[in-house]
């Protein structure tokens, strides 16, 4: 992107926004796909384990919060690492690395 005129600041902003979009999509996918699967699995396991009695599902708020914290924290760290690595390399070196 720098070869077509993107400044360093714009590239930094683009990397961070792209990473946050990936992290937000991952969190949304976990909630939309994982939550219904967890409810069904909880129902089936409790029915088989407790002689037909179904234990209600309880959403793991603390664990989900920690997951989101780690996910977005790692995304910020990886974005910062990518930006610092790009600043250290010249444009020519970056283009050679892509090829």
Image: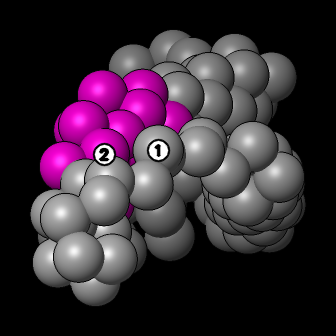
Above or below residue 57? Residue 16 is above
- Label 1 sits on residue: 56
Q: Position of residue 28 (x, y in %)?
A: 42, 28
> Is 35 included in the stretch rendered in magenta?
yes
Point out the image quarter for the C terminus.
Answer: bottom left
Q: Which mark is residue 39?
A: 2
At 33% from the left and 77% from the top, the residue drawn is 50
Tell me if 63 is positioned left or right of 54 in this view.
right
Query: Of all residues shown, which one is farthest toward the bottom?
Result: 49
| Residue density around tag 2, few if under 14, some if 14–19, many if 20 or more, within 10 Å | some
At 83% from the left and 52% from the top, the residue drawn is 62
Above or below residue 6? Residue 64 is below
Compare residues 13 and 90 and report the one nearer the observer: 13
Q: Would you say the magenta stretch is mainly helix, strand or loop? A: helix
Q: Position of residue 88 (x, y in %)?
A: 80, 67
Q: Are marks 2 and 1 in contact (CB under 8 Å)?
A: no
Q: Position of residue 34 (x, y in %)?
A: 31, 47
Question: Residue 23 appears in which quarter of the rendering?
Answer: top right
> Is 11 included in the stretch rendered in magenta?
no
In this picture, which residue range is highlighted in magenta? 26-42
Q: Position of residue 71 (x, y in %)?
A: 67, 55
Tell me if 60 is positioned left or right of 28 in this view.
right
Question: Residue 49 appears in which quarter of the rendering?
Answer: bottom left
């Amino acid at each position: 992107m720098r070869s077509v005129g993107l400044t360093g600041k714009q590239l930094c902003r683009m990397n961070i926004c792209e990473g946050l979009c990936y992290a937000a999509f991952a969190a949304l996918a976990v909630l939309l796909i994982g939550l219904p699967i967890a409810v069904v699995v909880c129902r089936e396991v409790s029915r088989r384990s407790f002689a037909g009695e179904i234990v209600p599902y309880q959403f793991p708020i603390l664990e989900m919060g920690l997951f989101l914290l780690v996910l977005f924290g790692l995304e910020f760290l990886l974005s910062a690492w990518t930006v610092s690595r790009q600043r250290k390399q010249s444009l020519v070196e970056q283009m050679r690395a892509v090829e």
